[in-house]
């Protein structure tokens, strides 16, 4: 059965390392017969959550009139989510964090999802990805029955394209095919 796959690429660099892994994941998912869409998060107008909680008392409508409403609807409808970020200061980048914060109006509707996590880092140390993966896991704990189905960590990649030729590219493709 065909799955609806939504890939959220938060890299500010189109063609950056985490973005390239998203492309490989998407290629595998499509070749396996799934519907897949990639959203380049920095191309979207997404305001910061102000913590006003108006959305919690008005049926899930955010006070911001921006692109997040459409993205949130797609997140709710998707069967599979892919969250991808470069690692900045041992955590997800600001674009991904803002997107996650803005799921507040309807976060309980982001339920029963298989979620794949993609992160890339210049650092090669054992703790290079720990903060990022923990941050993702903490956010996902708010989404009912969200299951981390796979994690790809590309370490030692600094310049756009450094990930090419590394095993993580094939791994992203295979994970996409396995959806």
Image (cartoon, rainbow, N blue to C red):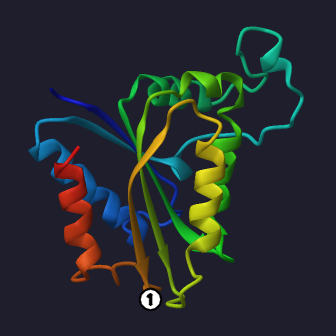
Q: Residue 32: horizontal and vertical position, in percent?
A: 11, 43
The quadrant where residue 107 appears = top right
Residue at horizontal 38%, vertical 29%?
78
Choose between 142 and 124: the one closer to the eye. Answer: 142
**Residue labelled with disc 1:** 156
Q: Residue 148: horizontal and vertical position, in percent?
A: 44, 49
What is the quadrant of the N terminus in the image? top left
Q: Count the marks: how many?
A: 1
Q: Residue 48: horizontal and vertical position, in percent?
A: 76, 42
* Residues packed near mark 1 inside 10 Å, few (<14), some (14 to 19) or many (20 plus): some
Decide: is 1 above or below 33: above
Residue at horizontal 64%, vertical 22%?
106
Q: Is residue 96 visible?
A: no
Choose between 26 and 113: the one closer to the eye. Answer: 113
Decide: is 102 above or below 117: above
Residue at horizontal 11%, vertical 36%?
33
Choose between 9 and 128: the one closer to the eye. Answer: 128
Decide: is 91 above or below 113: below
Residue at horizontal 51%, vertical 27%?
111
Callout 1: SS: loop
Q: Is residue 86 left or right of residue 63?
A: left
Q: Is residue 172 left or right of residue 45?
A: left
């Amino acid at each position: 059965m065909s799955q609806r796959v939504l890939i959220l690429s938060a890299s500010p660099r189109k063609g950056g390392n985490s973005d390239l892994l998203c492309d490989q994941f998407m290629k595998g998912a499509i070749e396996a017969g799934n519907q897949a869409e990639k959203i380049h998060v920095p191309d979207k107008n997404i305001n910061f959550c102000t913590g006003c909680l108006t959305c919690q008392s008005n049926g899930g409508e955010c006070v911001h009139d921006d692109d997040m409403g459409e993205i949130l609807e797609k997140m709710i409808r998707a069967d599979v989510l892919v969250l991808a970020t470069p690692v900045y200061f041992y955590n997800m980048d600001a674009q991904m964090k803002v997107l996650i914060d803005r799921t507040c109006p309807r976060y309980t509707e982001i339920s029963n999802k298989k979620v794949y996590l993609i992160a890339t880092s210049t650092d090669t140390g054992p703790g290079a990805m720990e903060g990022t993966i923990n941050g993702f896991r903490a956010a996902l704990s708010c989404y009912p029955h969200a299951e981390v189905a796979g994690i790809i960590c590309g370490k030692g990649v600094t310049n756009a394209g450094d990930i090419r030729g590394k095993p993580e590219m094939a791994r992203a493709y295979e994970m996409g095919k396995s959806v």
